Image (cartoon, rainbow, N blue to C red):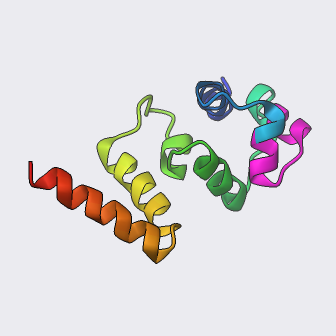
């Protein structure tokens, strides 16, 4: 059976221009751990690791583990957006809301 999870992670990592080392650092993992996930399919990351990998790659965990899904859905894109928005402090969220309001008035 092909390592679909690993292939998906590798493709997304490369699209974001991240090295193995950079993804490992963002997820609190070792470079060899990420390499094994991408290339050997031996390791099954924990739900916690999958969540960290998904966040680092700007996708959802659901997208990573769904072998039938090749593209992220609009709902998943929204989930990633709101996750990022929620991570900002209130002042930054307010600025973004002001920008959205300005665009909405066009």
Residue at x-position 44% and y-position 28%: 70
**Residue 89, percent across and down?**
51, 73
Residue 80 magenta-highlighted: no
What number of labels is visible?
0
Q: Which residues are magenta?
A: 23-36
Residue 30 magenta-highlighted: yes
Q: Nearer the viewer, residue 70 or 31?
A: 31
Decide: is 9 above or below 105: above
Task: Tell me which secondary structure the magenta stretch mostly adopts.
Answer: helix
Residue 86 located left or right of residue 48: left
**Residue 53, percent across and down?**
66, 48
- Whether residue 73 can be seen here: yes
Residue at x-position 53% and y-position 67%: 87
The residue furthest left is 106
Residue at x-position 66% and y-position 52%: 50
**Residue 22, percent across and down?**
78, 39
Residue 53 located left or right of residue 80: right
**Residue 36, percent across and down?**
84, 33
Decide: is 88 above or below 51: below
């Amino acid at each position: 059976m092909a390592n679909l999870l690993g292939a998906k992670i590798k493709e997304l990592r490369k699209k974001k221009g991240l090295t193995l080392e950079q993804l490992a650092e963002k997820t609190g993992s070792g470079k060899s751990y990420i390499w094994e996930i991408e290339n050997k399919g031996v390791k099954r990351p924990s739900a916690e690791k999958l969540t960290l990998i998904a966040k680092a790659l700007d996708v959802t965990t659901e997208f990573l583990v769904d072998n039938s899904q090749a593209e992220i859905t609009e709902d998943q894109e929204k989930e990633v957006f709101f996750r990022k928005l929620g991570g900002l402090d209130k002042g930054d969220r307010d600025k973004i809301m002001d920008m959205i309001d300005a665009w909405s008035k066009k």
